Image (cartoon, rainbow, N blue to C red):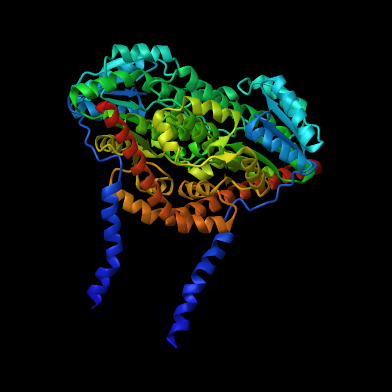
Amino acid sequence: MASPLLLFPVVMAPVVFAAVLAFLVRPRPVRIPIKGRHVFITGGSSGIGLALARLAAAEGARVSILARRAAHLQEARDAIRLATGVDVAVFSADVRDADAVAKAVEAAGPVDVLVCNHGVFTPQELEKQDLEEVRLMVEVNLMGTFNLIKAALPPMKQRTKATGLPASIAIMSSQAGQVGVYGYTAYSASKFALRGLAEALQHEVIADDIHVSMIFPPDTETPGFAEEHRRRPDLTNIIAGSSGGMKADDVAKKALDGIKSSRFIVPCNFEGTMLSIATAGLSPQSSFLTALAEVLGAGFMRFMGLCFQWNWFSSIENWHSKKKGM
Amino acid sequence: MASLFFLFLLLPFAILLLVLAAIVRPRPVRIPLKGRHVLVTGGSSGIGLALALRAAAEGARVTIFARDPSRLQDARHAIRLATGVDVAVLAADVRDSEAVARALEAADYVDVLICNHGVFLPQELERQSLEEVRFMVEVNLMGTFHLIKAALPAMKQRAKESGLPASIAIMSSQAGQVGIYGYTAYSASKFGLRGLAEALQHEVIADNIHITLVFPPDTDTPGLAEEHKRRPEVTKLIAGSQGGMKADDVAKKALHGIKSGQFVVACNFEGYLLHVATVGLSPQRSYFMAFVEILGVGLMRFVALCYQWSWFTIIEKWHAKMRSDLLRETSDSLHT
């Protein structure tokens, strides 16, 4: 007869805990509608950006895409029109140029969902890499995002006040923005930095009903990836090969779902979810269920992380001894 | 009976410790400072100066690197007065990759490179100029890339010749573990350093070079005094407005961590908690720390969620107060 009495706290404890988390989690979750709203996507003429634009257009959003080359933008526009019947607005600018970005954002009109998806990635050992390439990644991936947010923010704030609807600033990061591995000093630096930006930014814009989302895709089959793969150092292939690749459309779907649910961290596959639990850090979390998974799973994930590092450092050791042996 | 049960309970923990002892990478290392060349950037004031003082007192051959030659001279005198040791000085702006390359060449080789320089200007991104954002990214992040790129070849050579482990230490900040109101640019630059460090450790481990990231809290330095003048109200409410740790205490912790080849160095108790919460996939050489991390990270995530609850509540309340103050002002002015 003692057993039901013992069972009660055992069953209630997680329920109580989940309730506590439901009370604690901040910011509170919101639904961010995209139908009929202005979605502005950078790097929108190819890869994940193009997939996002197609998806958003198909869901009834008013889509603008920004990229550097006018020809690519036209092709993208045609492709989207063919696939969805929807016409998107195109803007040509280099995200490194703050003035050009400001002009493009102004011409596009107030944005409801800003998707900073543009990015460049050239893997190489820092010792071998040109500082120009390092600088390119930091300028495009990091400063470019600052330029966009700075330009879009004031009208976004006006817009949420006027419409009473929540807005979103979504930032495309990468699993390389959750863990730095061989060959990715510059790329990981730029992507880790986006997280620092995003965590602080969320504090600054929550009162304006703007919600920040970070998307962490794995290797994704895009033209950019094909380029990157050609240059990958051996060891990067050996190490990063441990993460599976995804189709751009699937990444776009996960990204859009995450944006619409105002999630701060948006993983794209199972491995990504594990990585996100391992690297949750002090990031905000609006879903109490995910918070529960994080609290319960973080310990095991740390152990997994240590196993990964053991595997990676062993690979590095083996590769070097093989080279010396040759 | 009870003691057997107790032992049985401890068994899984003992097994975990054993497994961790086998798998933690990179392996632990001791990095000697005595008689070796330690170069400290941002070495003419604050934490950098304290680091230079300590390293000199421990018998290292020290070079301090900063922008202003006269402040470098002041620092050199201060160190000579305190330790009797004469340090070398190098003047250059870390943003200038060529100047950095020339300076590192003049320095010959470096055994322990401490990238400690940094600037921090808190402000809401909406109000901050892109120039200031760029300033922080250029100095804190690109400046560190410049230094490492310039120092690496000679470091590798030297580590091979001397057979002794070398170190690249990077001064981050608790703002490099969590981003808060007012710190978009600063946190961006400091988070960036972690991505750099994790990847770099993979690339240089085979050359016996060991990376250390130091995460100090607010530290009593001239830099902090300047920063406090411009801290937004909300940042003060969240991060506090008091002074912080003493620079010398931070330097002591930093140097200790560098000598033990620790990847992450926390400087106070809060820092340890923050470290466990944000450990992510960082490498860990100490099987005991790994053990603590595994057992503690879940609880720390809960504590983190509590902190975010508190911070978002502060932000909400502050905005409500601003709105009601504005309303009151408006109604007052209407009535006069």
Viewer-side residue, A49 vs B142: A49
Residue displayed at 77% across by 46% down: A164
Residue displayed at 75% across by 24% down: A74
User: How many marks do you count on the picture?
Assistant: 0
In the image, taking residue A223 as reference, residue A31 lies left or right, namely right
Identity of the residue furthest to the front in this view: A326
**Residue B232 location in percent, x, y?**
56, 37
Residue displayed at 71% across by 45% down: A166
**Residue A305 location in percent, x, y?**
40, 47
Viewer-side residue, B17 vs B32: B17
Identity of the residue furthest to the bottom in this view: A1
**Residue A320 location in percent, x, y?**
30, 30
Which quadrant of the view contains residue B250? top left
Viewer-side residue, A42 vs A323: A323
Quarter of the picture holding the C terminus of chain B: top right
Q: Is residue A203 above or below residue A118?
A: below
**Residue A103 location in percent, x, y?**
72, 22
In the image, taking residue B39 as reference, residue A139 lies left or right, namely right
In the image, taking residue B335 as reference, residue A266 lies left or right, namely left
Q: Is residue B209 visible?
A: no
Residue displayed at 42% across by 32% down: A236
In the image, taking residue A201 as reference, residue A132 lies left or right, namely left
Q: Is residue A152 visible?
A: yes
Quarter of the picture holding the N terminus of chain B: bottom left
